[in-house]
Amino acid sequence: MIKADVQSSKPKAAVKMSYYFGKGKRKCATATARLYLGGSGRLVINDKPIEEKDDYFEPLKRVGKDKDFDVVIKVSGGGINGQKQAIRLAIAKALVNGLPELKKSLRMANFLTTDSRIRERKKYGLKKARRAPQFAKR
């Protein structure tokens, strides 16, 4: 077992990150986005390159930065639409984290608003959240 010398440890200098990070949620879907600086507009979702970029790149197109970053997304949970909306929110939040001057234009375009509606839980005695079992008179 190696013991570290506590007195000789110096505070580390702040390292400038080479990407901007953002996290987005919608329904049951969660997405994390990394916008790598000096990119060429490449989009990778869950380690798969994506050619169709229309829905995902809306925040980047809105501010004219769609060719400036390589975007790497990790997304899980939910369905297709929930994941798309979570990705869009994650990209917008990553842009604001890196370039705060874009916040007003993204807010006006409604890209930074989190839709907090989630699925209602199932209650006991019911088929779904509100659907009761069919009533049989006889």
Image: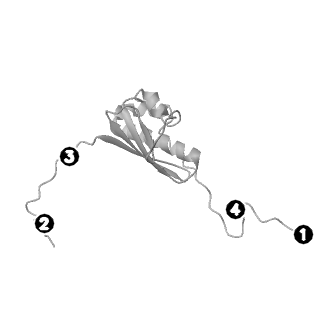
- Hey, what amino acid is under mark 1? Lys
Residue closest to the far bottom:
1
> Which label is found at residue 90?
none
The answer for how far apart the CA atoms under marks 3 and 1 are is 72 Å
**Which of 17 and 133 lies nearest the eye of the viewer?**
17
Residue 13 vs residue 134: left or right? left
Residue under label 3, please give it: 14
Residue closest to the far left:
8
**Which of 80 and 111 lies nearest the eye of the viewer?**
80
Q: Earlier in the sequence, mark 3 or mark 2?
A: 2
- Residue 78 screen position, x and y as percent: 56, 52
Q: Local crowd at mark 4 within 10 Å, few (<14), some, or many (≥20)?
A: few
Residue under label 4, please give it: 128
- Hey, what amino acid is under mark 3? Ala
> Which label is found at residue 4?
2
- At a point 13% along the width and 66% down the height, the residue shown is 4
Q: Earlier in the sequence, mark 4 or mark 1?
A: 4
Q: Check contact, mark 4 vs mark 1: CB within 8 A.
A: no
Residue 83 vs residue 60: left or right? right
- At a point 43% along the width and 42% down the height, the residue shown is 44
Q: Does dot 1 land on a helix, a strand or a loop?
A: loop
